[in-house]
Amino acid sequence: MRTQDAGHRAAAIAAIADREYRRAGDEYTRAGWRVLADPREGIEPFAADEKGWVGDGLQYLATSAVCYRVAGKDTRATRRGVEGVAVAKDLTNGLEHPVQHACLKEFVADFRAVGGLDGVESAYREAEAAYNDANSAVDSPQAWGTTPLFEAAATLLQQVARGPANGEIAIPWEDLHGADPGDPGSFLAQRAVVKRQRFPSLIEQVIDDGFLATPRGTTEYDTDHHRCPHCGSADVNWVAESVVCLRCSRPTAETS
């Protein structure tokens, strides 16, 4: 069961496939607000939650900002960035663990990056320091790194990186984390390091290209049942309620 986005995430992905990035930004915004208000049944947005389901709401708001920037709606993107910074900071009143607070700082830096705000580098360095400070409180960094909060904070970077990588996974989970889980702080702090080094330039590239890929879902290569009418690829990506080309993220066509 995903978070309760009322179908707006699926609508946003369909809009990306249609290259309607302003509409995608609107739908991702609605998905973000919906999840932030009521993440899942029995989960309160301002209560302690070791899984951090509210992270999906932050991710959708951040994704909306990227969509608006690709659509040339920079003012709306900036507003989402400012909004996201405020929400991520406020959520520290609910999520209790120090490593979750570090992840929220990572989100703050993300919102500065996607919104075109200043202070991006220093915000990622603050997140890096927060992860290192949380070192003694983390027993299993791999377990934390696969909770919904942390996965949500990784999803947009991976989505943005797909376009310049011809639809492939350009930044896998392993690249976002350190080599030694026995040093939990450093292991998780690598997330902020990689984002500081790569995320701003990737955002600028998708803006320059005018192309944001859909998220990656279930994929199949060289199929005999689908072919993209736009680029001719037979590689398919099933995500949300859309069936799109793995390469160009446009709707793909079923062949006879």
Image: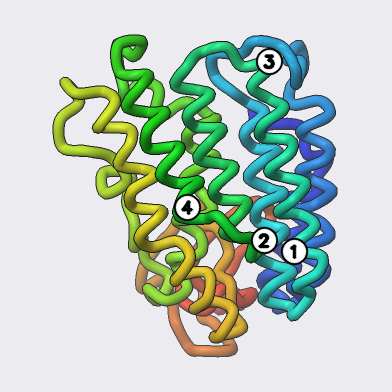
Instruction: Please name the amino acid that badge 3 sits on.
Output: Gly
Residue nearer the viewer, 181 or 238: 181
Q: CB under 8 Å between callouts 3 and 2?
A: no
Residue on which disc 1 sits: 77
Instruction: Please name the amino acid that badge 1 sits on.
Output: Ala
Residue on which disc 2 sits: 115
Residue nearer the viewer, 136 or 62: 136
Q: How many marks?
A: 4
**Which of disc 4 and disc 1 is earlier in sequence?**
1
Rendered residue at 69%/17% (across/down): 93
Residue 126 drawn above or below residue 28: above
**Which of disc 2 and disc 3 is earlier in sequence?**
3
x, y percentage for residue 23?
A: 82, 68
Q: CA distance from mark 3 to mark 1?
A: 26 Å
Residue nearer the viewer, 93 or 225: 93
How dense is the environment of label 4, judged by Cα within 10 Å: few (below 14), some, or many (20 and up)?
few
Residue on which disc 3 sits: 94
Q: CA distance from mark 3 to mark 4?
A: 33 Å
Q: Quick one: SS at disc 3?
A: loop
Residue 95 drawn above or below residue 237: above
Q: Which of labels 1 and 4 is toward the front?
A: 1
